[in-house]
Image (cartoon, rainbow, N blue to C red):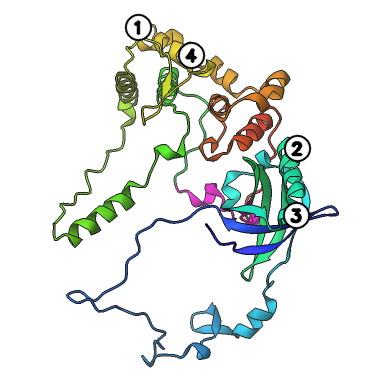
Amino acid sequence: MAKAVWKGTLTFGLVSLPVALYPATESHAVRFHQLQRGTTDRVRQRRVNERTGEEVPFEDVVKGYELAEGQYVVVEPAELEELSPGRSRTIEIGGFADLAEIDPVLFDRTYYLGPADPATAKVYQLLVEALAHSRRAGIAVFAMRGKEYLTAVDSADGLLELRTLHWADELRDPQQEVPDLPARRREFNRTELATAEQLIEMLSVDWNPDDYHDTHEERVRALVAAKAEGREVALSAGAEPEATELTDLADVLRRSLDEARAARGTGPKGGRSGRSGRSGKPGTAGAAGAAGAAGAAGAAGAAGAAGARNAPKRERARRAPEPPEAVEGLGSLTKAELYRRAAALGVPHRSTMTRDQLQYALEAAARPRRKLGKAS
């Protein structure tokens, strides 16, 4: 059982709720010590004066902010301690925002927020249900471990979750950070676009995080186990995939679609009776899957051009806002059904969302999305 990393009070309005914060994730990374080659002697890191080469005691280490090369503003640890926000005793919710309006790039870490006093279980459950029904998240700023955090508190699967967020000025502008980023094109070869959409639909899966695992860590552990038994392991990085030439794009897409169909056991003109992921688990195909399969049959053969002419219509239908009656019925759908709708609408980052977040995102898709500012 995880140990609480923080305890305090969550407040909204005049309501106060004792809560405890627990890590929602843990790392399974293999940890190594540094040794000198040919020995089992540990290698230690020490604080050394780079000019004299002498070790510096910890109490003689201060902070230095470099103004220019070799020119520093010296700050004592005690001065920074005075400026530290300390440890907040309260998470005070200042307002409630639609979680779908928060760009997922802002999310940092997730914590479980549990009740700290069994006597307040009713208040805790009330907030869980109220947040679930309102489809909003409480926004609060609080301090922990000498650092201030912007957070969003929402309800998921019967408990409260607290997500730390990046500050707005921490976001990088992709237009400035990503070199050679192509301008978004409005005109594409219709056949290529239709084939790419069919390939995406053919490879679509029902999201289940248990279907995926860290194969790199597994190989590292296998290497350690083999060496512990005195066995040598042949390692190979494999060949780097070559970039697809623009002149080969249509042919590569068609061959990819054929391979996907063969893996699914469907012919060029065959439909699918169900959806299965890479793990081979069957699922139920929704309307989007049926439409994708029907579209694939139209563009697979000589009638591909006719299917391509319908591609812009399919794109507009996919991006169109959901009708009010469809939005109102989202509460009765399963997570898999919500995910299929999100995929049909092209909702970004849907694979990382909980069921409630998927519902929020679909409801947000029915209205204009708020524009987020970029870091200056």
How many neighbours does mark 3 have within 10 angstroms: few (below 14), some (14-19), or many (20 or more)? few
Q: Which residue is drawn at 64% across and 32% down?
A: 359
Left or right: residue 184 compared with residue 132: left
Left or right: residue 188 compared with residue 91: left
Q: Residue at x 69, y 27 (%)?
A: 366
Q: Is mark 4 on a helix, strand or loop?
A: helix
Nearer to the camera, 2 or 215: 2
Furthest residue toward right: 14
- The residue at which mark 3 appears reads as 119
- The residue at which mark 4 appears reads as 290
Amino acid type of the residue that numbered disc 4 sits on in the rendered structure: Ala
Amino acid type of the residue that numbered disc 2 sits on in the rendered structure: Ser
- Tell me where residue 177 appears, x and y as whole percent: 50, 52
Q: Residue 134 carries which label?
A: 2
- Mark 3 and 1 residues: CB-CB less than 8 Å, in contact? no
Q: What element carries label 1?
A: loop
- Tell me where residue 368 appears, x and y as whole percent: 70, 32
- Mark 2 and 4 residues: CB-CB less than 8 Å, in contact? no
- The residue at which mark 1 appears reads as 302
Nearer to the camera, 140 or 132: 132
Counting residues from the start of the chain, the first of labels 1 and 2 encountered is 2
